Amino acid sequence: MDNKELQKLTEDISETYFKKPFRHQALFNDRLKTTGGRYLLTSHNIELNRKYLIEHGREELIGIIKHELCHYHLHLEGKGYKHRDRDFRMLLQQVNAPRFCTPLKKKAENKKTYMYICTTCGQQYIKKRAMNPDRYRCGKCRGKIKRIFS
């Protein structure tokens, strides 16, 4: 789906659920990381996270569009458009829009670990942060610690 298709979808959803036209731009913003979408108060545009379409599908994206359109229409009407406002929560229920979107799966990060071993007793230590082995001793036998590479 590109920005033209997204614009058409947003206009259709606005007409179908809100019975009002959407006169501004809806577009994908690939810089969004943690949010499904956002309504920009100054330009009245709606930005959406493409990752939600890829990971959760079209239905989730439609829910996010409805949520952002609630902000849009209430703001233009001068009513309470913030999440805590009664007008906003009531409109969410009327159009069956989600209050929050489904979280994205976090990508698996490779956590680097450092391995150290006692030269006397062989006790192994696995650390998340690097340390200077000359400044520390084994907690078991007080022997010297040496870094090993795994």
Image (cartoon, rainbow, N blue to C red):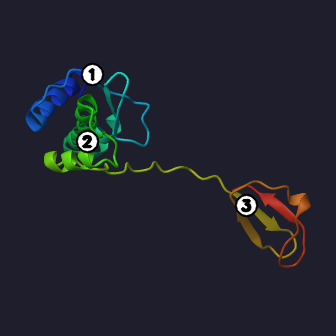
The quarter of the image holding the C terminus is bottom right
Disc 2 from disc 1: Cα separation = 15 Å
Q: Amino acid at mark 2?
A: His
| Badge count | 3
Q: Amino acid at mark 3?
A: Met
Residue 94 position (above or below residue 74): below
- The x and y percentages for residue 26 are 27, 26
Q: Secondary structure at mark 2?
A: helix
- The x and y percentages for residue 104 are 37, 48
Q: Where does label 2 land, which residue? A: 67
> Picture quarter containing residue 11?
top left
> Picture quarter containing residue 138?
bottom right
Q: Where does label 1 land, which residue? A: 25
Q: Secondary structure at mark 3?
A: strand
Q: Secondary structure at mark 1?
A: loop
Q: Earlier in the sequence, mark 2 or mark 1?
A: 1
Residue 125 position (above or below residue 112): below
Q: Where does label 3 land, which residue? A: 115
Disc 2 from disc 3: Cα separation = 49 Å
Residue 34 position (above or below residue 29): below
